[in-house]
Amino acid sequence: MRPATHPPIIVLGAGLSGLSLTCALLDAGVRSSITLIDRRRGYTRDRTWCTWETADLRFPSAVTHRWASWSVGGPDGVQIATSHRHPYVHLAAERVYVAALERIDAAPTVTLCLGESVRDAVCGPGPGPGPGAPVRVTTSARTLEAPLVFDALGPHSPLAAGAPPDRLDFAQRFVGWEIESDRPVFNPAVATLMDFLPHAGVGVTFLYLLPFSPTRALIEHTAIEPLAAPAVDRDAALAEEIARRWPEIRYECRHRERGLIPMTPRRFPTERGPGLYTIGAAAGAIRPSSGYAYSRIQRQVSAVAGAVATGRPLPGDVADPRTLLLDRAFLQALASSPDPARLFQAAAAMEPDAFARFMTDAGGPRDVLAAVRALPVREMGAAALASLAGGWGRAGRRGWAPAGDGPGGAERPRAADPATASGRVPRYP
């Protein structure tokens, strides 16, 4: 057993973000003693993660299905895109957990503490992390200290300071059933990202369908709408839609999931005080315009781990400012467009490889420009101006400023564990 050669680290939360950061620190050669704390007592299939496959996909052994083709359908027909370079992938939660825990179990410097709730974390004096400025963490079981602490507990962390809602805060609400049909009705070669349904009010409603075989699929009834929108019985709506589309089948529901993914263009602080940093959903890892987070989480933890390993300052904003501005304009257009489904269909019409890179933050300025060109110029231009006029949230590594004072609501916990997750989070890129 080699001794630790970096300062001790505490990671609060052992969901996707906390496990991924711990693995990234190990992969980067960080030889700190790492204490990982989570209230859960075990790991189960509690969500689905999906994203597009890129060269730096973490936990590739957890991929159970790949779809080289995906579709977006609506009143104007169905668009099918194909990318063999960047297929759409499904990562089983239980496999992600196994891959991460095997890596952690093999590291003698890591201690995983389950069944402990985090109560508080208090920063010590000093300009930043280092000896003499420890962060004191209090859990339901004990008190411990480290000069470097990462909060991966999600947007509802007990350590998170409340922030006023943004006037463009949306939520993605969904209920999903994995069903086994008594006859083949699904096309396992094409994943359906969005098949739009009639929607009353602001936002869109659609079916999301992952066909695992001709007889087995995960089908989700999903709405992207303002946070304050009234609740809908999505189980009943999903059952009705399945009966309408496939009236001839009988099926068994093998698994059920539901969730709420906050979609907000606010910018989040990544530093809460000397030595206390935020990662994952509470750091802005959920893509505001889509709800995807898996890939963005992985890019953030890789950057953080590289900085810790080399002694560089930790990175600030998770999102590229250009992408965040485009996402904000997209939400503004979604709130004001008479045909919001058209926005998603236009985005999906991008060249498939560029679309996959853009959705996973794996591309560059050309891919962002391609997204701008694909979207309706008039609607997006007006939305960008309205968004800028309405205010812009600014957050450095230490602070947050409000972004407008329009209607909205506080983020609500998802029904599943609030620790970060689909290439759409619970699908948590």
Image (spheres, rainbow, N blue to C red):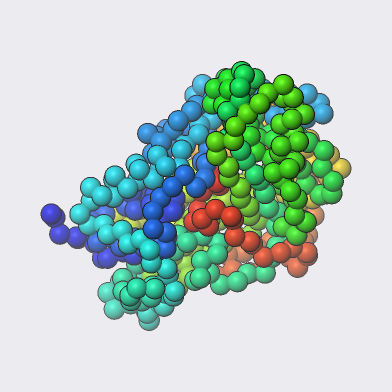
- Locate residue 422: give its quadrant: top right
Residue name at image x 58 percent, y 22 percent: 215
One can see residue 152 in this view: yes
Residue 165: give x, y in percent of width and height.
69, 65
Residue name at image x 68 percent, y 23 percent: 249
Compared to 116, does 15 lie above or below? Answer: above
Q: Is residue 108 left or right of residue 345?
A: left
Q: Is residue 20 left or right of residue 87?
A: left
Residue name at image x 32 percent, y 71 percent: 147
Residue 255: give x, y in percent of width and height.
55, 39
- Locate residue 7: give its quadrant: bottom left
One can see residue 317 in this view: no
Considering every residue shown, the one lying at the far left of the view is: 1
Residue name at image x 54 percent, y 22 percent: 213
Considering every residue shown, the one lying at the far bottom of the view is: 125
Q: Is residue 310 left or right of residue 66?
A: left
Residue 183: give x, y in percent of width and height.
62, 19
Compared to 251, does 369 lie above or below? Answer: below
Considering every residue shown, the one lying at the far right of the view is: 338
Q: Is residue 279 left or right of residue 373?
A: left
- Viewer-closest of 327 and 69: 69
- Viewer-closest of 387 and 147: 147
- Viewer-closest of 5 and 80: 80
Compared to 360, does 382 lie above or below? Answer: below
Q: The N terminus lies in which quarter of the figure? A: bottom left
How many discs mark residues in the rendered view? 0
